Amino acid sequence: MPNSMSIPANRENPLGTYLRDRRVRLDPAAFGLSGTRRRTSGLRREEVAQRAHISPTWYTWLEQGRGGAPSANVLDRIARALMLTDAEREHLFLLGLGRPPGIRHRPEEGVTPRLQRVLDALDPSPALVKTAIWDVVAWNRAASVVLTDYGALPPEQRNVLRLIFCDPGVRAAQHDWEGVARFVVAAFRADAARAAVAERAEALVRELSQRSTEFAAMWRDNDVRNHGEGVKQIRHATAGLIAFEYSAFAVDGRPDLGMVVYNPATPDDAERIRLLVQPQHMGPGAN
């Protein structure tokens, strides 16, 4: 029967092992500490604790597997102190709390050229990328032709909720406007809460509540839904009614963004979209 002392340390205390591993990889010179003689590589425990603004004793206990579970706030400060990447920070939370951290909204960043090429390759399926508050930040040609010509709108107007509730053309394009509107409000509520963007979401909710009594009433219902997948129909100005099967995906490395792809439901729907995309037709729609 194996002795308990033979169990690898990372199985006994994976959080402490991970913290120590990240700590010893840091270069003290990067923090102006190169003049100090050191017996081991990396930062000392007390130096990490100071950078994280926590007690050196508490940090030492975390590495030793004592003291109970840390809070999300403590883990976030330790992640900054250890200069962890987003992927490393997520791993730290999974080890310490058994769940990923809250999504950090980064409104100043767009999509990478590589992600835009992915969208473009999906033609003739309309596809777009949206933020946690449903600002559309990237799209392909099929989306601009079939759903909405986002490039013709000012950036602040490229918001799904503003379009659904405040744009008459987008509203008219919905086969079941009320069903779409209720779904959008409920999924937006879930995304905004998950991404911890309360201030930005509240500003949008106040604006739309003033501009649309229908939005205000739907928001008071407190419905919550995941985007997931489903079916959708659009009344296009020239192509008529087009049916889609849509799917939503998280963007790896950017949990504040989500991709939505609208696949034509039938070969006939796909052919009509191809005809729209090729001859440079443009018409109002929505997503």
Image (cartoon, rainbow, N blue to C red):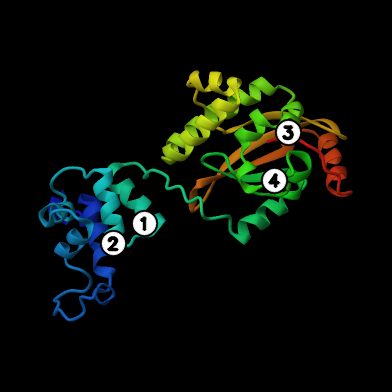
Seen at 63% across and 48% down, the residue is 155
Seen at 53% across and 55% down, the residue is 109
| Residue situated furthest left in the rendering | 57
The answer to whether one can see residue 8 in this image is no
Q: CA distance from mark 4 to mark 1?
A: 37 Å
Seen at 30% across and 58% down, the residue is 80
Near mark 4 (Cα within 10 A), the count class, few <14, some 14-19 or many ≥20, is few
Callout in the foreground (4, 1):
4
Q: Looking at numbered disc 4 in the image, what kind of residue is underneath it?
A: Leu
Q: CA distance from mark 2 to mark 1?
A: 10 Å
Q: Looking at numbered disc 2 in the image, what kind of residue is underneath it?
A: Leu
Read off the residue under disc 1. 88
Read off the residue under disc 4. 153
Disc 3 and disc 1 in contact, CB within 8 angstroms: no
Mark linked to residue 244: 3
Near mark 2 (Cα within 10 A), the count class, few <14, some 14-19 or many ≥20, is many
Of mark 4 and mark 3, the one earlier in the sequence is: 4
The answer to whether one can see residue 263 in this image is yes
Q: Looking at numbered disc 3 in the image, what kind of residue is underneath it?
A: Phe
Give the image location of residue 179, x and y in percent. 64, 21
Give the image location of residue 194, x and y in percent. 43, 37
Q: Secondary structure at mark 1?
A: helix
Residue 31 found in image quarter = bottom left
Mark linked to residue 82: 2
Of mark 3 and mark 1, the one earlier in the sequence is: 1
Of mark 4 and mark 2, the one earlier in the sequence is: 2
The C terminus - image quarter: top right
Q: Secondary structure at mark 4?
A: loop
Seen at 42% across and 48% down, the residue is 104
